[in-house]
Image (tube, helix red, strand yellow):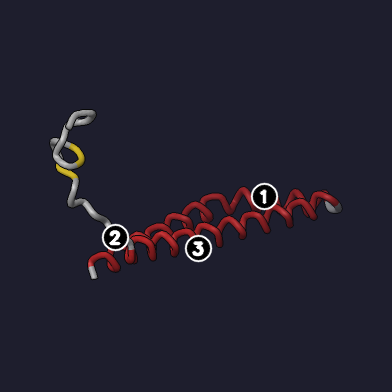
Amino acid sequence: MVGALGAAVKFLATIFGIGLIFLYTQPAFDYQKSVAQGMGGEAEENYAFAVGNRQFVLFTFVILAVISGILEVFGVEDNSTYRMSRGFNGTRRGRR
């Protein structure tokens, strides 16, 4: 349960962080939208492309956060052969 709870907290923190980034950059996109609409034509089409890319990045980050949370919950970590002072299997590096 601790693993699932930790993964849920990390997932929510990641989503909150992504939301803060998008909230911080939104005024720049609003300005870009008004300029593109003012110019019309190709500029307005290019802005629609930029918005599409922004939405794709948003969904990609959310999907990656979900996948990393699932891997954290169901992943197995084996530290049984590692010792803090001697490295792997209790030996120094390069020596047996």
Give the secondary structure at mark 2: loop
- Tell me: 14 left or right of 89: right
Residue 15 sits in which quadrant?
Answer: bottom left
Label 2 or label 3, whichever lies nearer to me, is: 2
Label 3 or label 1, whichever lies nearer to me, is: 3
Whether residue 74 is situated above or below residue 83 in the rendered picture? below
**Where in the figure is residue 54, as x and y percent of width and height?**
62, 55
Residue name at image x 69 percent, y 49 percent:
32
Q: CA distance from mark 3 to mark 1?
A: 28 Å
Residue name at image x 61 percent, y 59 percent:
56
Give the secondary structure at mark 1: helix
Q: Are marks 2 and 3 in contact (CB under 8 Å)?
A: no
Q: Residues within 10 Å of mark 1 (few under 14, many from 20)?
A: few
Question: Tag 3: residue type?
Answer: Ile
Residue 74 sits in which quadrant?
Answer: bottom left
Residue 85 sits in which quadrant?
Answer: top left
**Where in the figure is residue 22, as x and y percent of width and height?**
53, 55
Q: Are marks 3 and 1 in contact (CB under 8 Å)?
A: no
Of pointers 2 and 3, the one earlier in the residue sequence: 3
The quadrant of the image that shows the N terminus is bottom left
Residue 76's disc number: 2
Whether residue 2 is situated above or below residue 42 in the rendered picture? below
Residue name at image x 21 percent, y 51 percent:
79
**90 and 11: which is toward the camera:** 90
Question: Tag 2: residue type?
Answer: Val
**Where in the figure is residue 24, as x and y percent of width and height?**
51, 51
- Residue placed farthest to the bottom in the image? 1
Residue 31's disc number: 1
**5 and 39: which is toward the camera:** 5
Residue name at image x 44 percent, y 60 percent:
65
Residue 32 shows in this picture: yes
Residue on which disc 3 sits: 63
